[in-house]
Image (cartoon, rainbow, N blue to C red):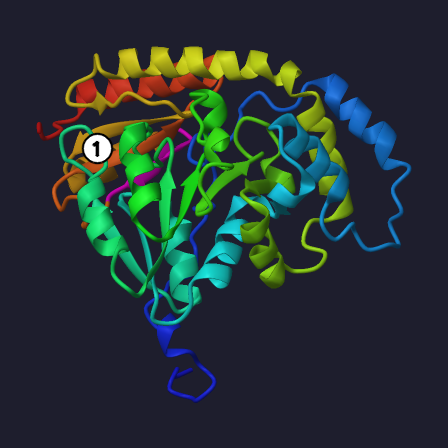
Amino acid sequence: MKKDKKYYRDSLRELKPYDPHEVPYKIKLNANENPYGLPEEIIEEILRKVKNLEFPRYPNANSVKLSEAVSSFWGLSGDNIVIGNGSDELIDYLIKAFSEKGRRVITTAPSFAMYKIYSIINGSNFVQIPLGQGNFSLNEDKILEEAKKEDSSVVFIAYPNAPTGNYFAEDKITKIIEESGCLVVVDEAYFEFGEKTFVPLISQYDNLVILRTLSKAYSIASLRVGYLLSNPEIINEIRKVKSPFNVNTFSQLAAQVVFENKEILKDSIKKIVGERKRLTNKINEFPPFKAHPSQTNFVLVEVGSKENANLVYNSLLEQGILVQIVSDPLFSTSRYFLRISVGNKEENDILLKELKNVSKNHSLTRF
């Protein structure tokens, strides 16, 4: 069917549907999920409480009980929080509320793909500022140059950044918050693996939003729950565009139980951090791979050329190991990476064995 009819949107012509890379696998290391799952005692508590849910009724519109549990933990109130179907939905709400057709949304290159997708869907102009080539550093001056333009409205900064896995200098982010004149969204999806946060600054800046997800450290990616924190004025604007019953009742309940028992999850987070260090060190023993330091639950592995990336990806997939190829021509036209989620020890051992085999038995170009 030709897309020249009046009911098709011109702005979506070049946008491809999101590809979740659903291919057969034995070991899934491409989506940055927690490989350890929920402890049995948390699952049992969820199942006990689910019997009392009123399934014929709509969910609580603002996820009040979950909102209270999360906001009070951070010393905030229900006026400082919005719960969403994962942080993806909240990114969409932020752009809907604070940008519009012709206005600019700014982030880094590379960065989280959904910033671009939702910007295009909502008709905003999407601008990316490349990170420093040496250490993936933030170019705050270039971001500010773009942000200070009259038609700029939102700046997204992933902290730590995905897919590079590193934290940016705090003073650079603070400078952007103070001088940009834009809404600045600090996306802390991987907070639990590095524990640096801008949450204490919410009361200091009226243009700061913090994004969080329960899909990574909290082991409930399947339930799609995220939240954002900001001041009441920002929250009120977001609620204007929020779907009225956006988070289902079961997800609200399960997320509350998980959040209130988050101390139990610290053991799995500690294991992930330990395995992350081991993976990084071991991968760097296999030429020509270079595993970059990470503060997340994944490792970014530089592989050199596009040919290398495809060869390694396909070699892993032949063994049932699913990882993610990463490249961004705005950042570099010559650098290619694999983003590898940190699995459990057994999964990581199989991965390392195969990477060693690929390094030893294939003629990979050096870089």
Residue drawn at x 57%, y 44% is 86
Residue drawn at x 64%, y 34% is 71
- Secondary element type, mark 1: loop
| Residue 306 image point, x, y percent | 17, 41
Residue drawn at x 20%, y 52% is 145
- For residue 97, say whether it is visible: yes
- For residue 314, say whether it is visible: no
Residue 322 included in the magenta stretch of the image: yes
Residue where numbered disc 1 is placed: 137
User: Considering depth in this image, is 97 or 346 the residue closer to the camera?
Assistant: 97
User: Considering depth in this image, is 97 or 88 the residue closer to the camera?
Assistant: 97
Instruction: Looking at this view, name the residue that lies furthest to the front.
Output: 204
Residue 231 included in the magenta stretch of the image: no
| Residue 187 image point, x, y percent | 43, 39
Looking at the image, residue 81 lies above or below residue 171: below
Residue drawn at x 44%, y 31% is 198
In the drawing, does residue 298 fall left or right of residue 149? right
User: Considering depth in this image, is 275 or 181 the residue closer to the camera?
Assistant: 181
Residues packed near mark 1 inside 10 Å, few (<14), some (14 to 19) or many (20 plus): some
Q: Which residues are magenta?
A: 317-327
The image quadrant of residue 299 is top left
In the drawing, does residue 343 fall left or right of residue 244? left
Amino acid beneath label 1: Ser
| Residue 96 image point, x, y percent | 49, 62
In the drawing, does residue 54 fall left or right of residue 293? right
| Residue 82 image point, x, y percent | 62, 46
In the drawing, does residue 194 fall left or right of residue 45? left
The image quadrant of residue 357 is top left
Looking at the image, residue 279 lies above or below residue 153: above
